Amino acid sequence: MTNALEEAIRATYDGLAASHAEFCACQQCKDDVLTLALNHARPRYVTSNTLGAALTRVALSQDAAKAELAVIVFGAMRKVAEDPRHNAPPAGVA
């Protein structure tokens, strides 16, 4: 059993992170964004290789679902950027 939404959230994050370099993409921030986004979206659990899993993945690939996920993920990116939990780089290092 897996949450089909996790794949979609990760793909959405990858696309948004690539086009928004102003957000930190360190592993800690990425994990925080993914966790926050997943906690704000309704999970969609599926068992692998079933018709229901295929239908769920198709539904998540529709434009309306993609837009909804983009809003959720972008909101999570902004929230994490407001108060990142990663360690700041040493002074003088960028």
Image (cartoon, rainbow, N blue to C red):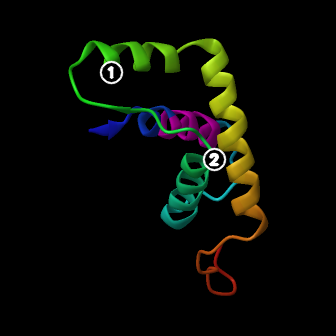
Q: Name which residue lies at 68% across and 28% down.
A: 68
Which element carries disc 2, helix, strand or loop? loop
Say which residue appears at 52% left-offset and 67% top-offset: 28
What residue span does the magenta drawing correspond to? 9-18
When the figure is inspected, residue 54 is found, relative to residue 41, above or below; the finding is: above
Q: Position of residue 54 (x, y in %)?
A: 33, 15
Question: In terms of image quadrants, where is residue 81?
Answer: bottom right
Work out which quarter of the rendered image holds the N terminus and state it.
top left
Looking at the image, residue 19 lies above or below residue 34 = above
Q: Quick check: 7 above or below 32?
A: above
Q: Position of residue 24 (x, y in %)?
A: 64, 59
Mark 2 is on which residue type? His
Q: Residues within 10 Å of mark 1 (few under 14, many from 20)?
A: some
Cα distance between the residues tagged 1 and 2: 21 Å
Three-letter amino acid code at disc 1? Ala
The image quarter containing residue 58 is top left
Q: Residue at x 67, y 33 (%)?
A: 70
Quadrant of the image occupied by residue 83? bottom right
Residue lying at 57% horizontally and 12% vertically, measured from the top left: 62
Camera-nearest residue between 74 and 19: 74
Lateral position of residue 84 relative to residue 25, left or right: right
37 with respect to 58 (left or right) = right
Q: Which residue is mark 1?
A: 53
Tag 1 secondary structure: helix
- Examine the residues drawn in magenta and state their main secondary structure: helix
Residue 67 within the magenta-colored segment of the rendering: no
The residue pinned by badge 2 equals: 40
